[in-house]
Image (spheres, helix red, strand yellow):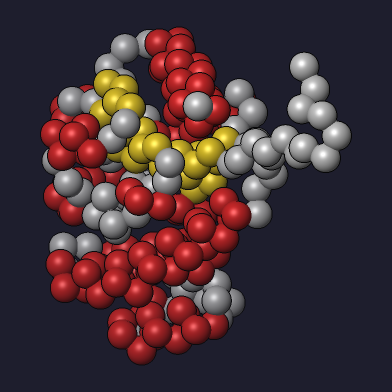
Amino acid sequence: MSDGPGVARPSPRVISLGLTGGQAAGKSTALRFFAERGALPLSSDQIVSDLYGRPGVIREVLDRFGEGVAAGDGGLDRAALRKRTAGDAGALDWLEKQLHPRVGREIAEQIARASAGSIVVVEVPLLFEAGLEDAFDFVVTIEAPLEVRRRRASGREGSSLFEVLDERQLSSEARRAGADFVYVNDVCPEDMAQFVDQVIEQVRRESAG
């Protein structure tokens, strides 16, 4: 049925999902499933990588940590920076204080640029820790038992930082309590794909209402 002349239909709005979870729980796999279903995938890690290329950020980090974290191209050596801050709570606190507000602003800008009707899914490992939960319409967390996550991380580059990074995060229970959707990734990938389908269906239904 037509709304009649002169009556404009409201444009479908962008739906934003914050995707978080424990270290090595499977967030990147979930992001890939969302992308395969037409969602726009964004990664806060990529945003941080881009920020590390900005002159103002480079200068702040070098002023704080010294030329030992400088790269030969004039940027930052992220591996050296990880080693410099590993196990140093004060250094990590300082770095996160500089980055989190910038990451939040960049996420908001990218969501605002998305096409009407899009679902934007942003992977943010420290979503709750950075206070970004209110930046999204819905929050999804991917969880897995500690031993499963530790085993998955054992073969990755930088896996020695697993314990340090895991301690920087909220507990699994806190993430579950703050999320709208929870998936426990200790089964097969097909089950995660089905979970993603269900999330997309539900957020579209709730947003349309």
Work out which residue is located at the far bottom of the displayed protein and give it.
Answer: 63
Which x, y percent locates residue 102?
44, 69
Residue at point 16%, 62% (across, down): 87
Residue at point 39%, 76% (across, down): 69
Quick check: 71 above or below 89?
A: below
**Visible residue check, residue 155:** no
Q: Quadrant of residue 1?
A: top right
Quick check: 171 above or below 32?
A: below
Count of marks placed on residues: 0
Residue at point 61%, 40% (across, down): 13
Which x, y percent locates residue 7?
77, 37
Which x, y percent locates residue 128?
26, 50
Between 51 and 70, the one lying in front of the other is 51
**Visible residue check, residue 138:** yes
Which x, y percent locates residue 174?
15, 39
Between 183 and 66, the one lying in front of the other is 183
Between 65 and 110, the one lying in front of the other is 110
Residue at point 23%, 67% (across, down): 92
Q: Quadrant of residue 17?
A: top left
Quick check: 108 above or below 169?
A: below
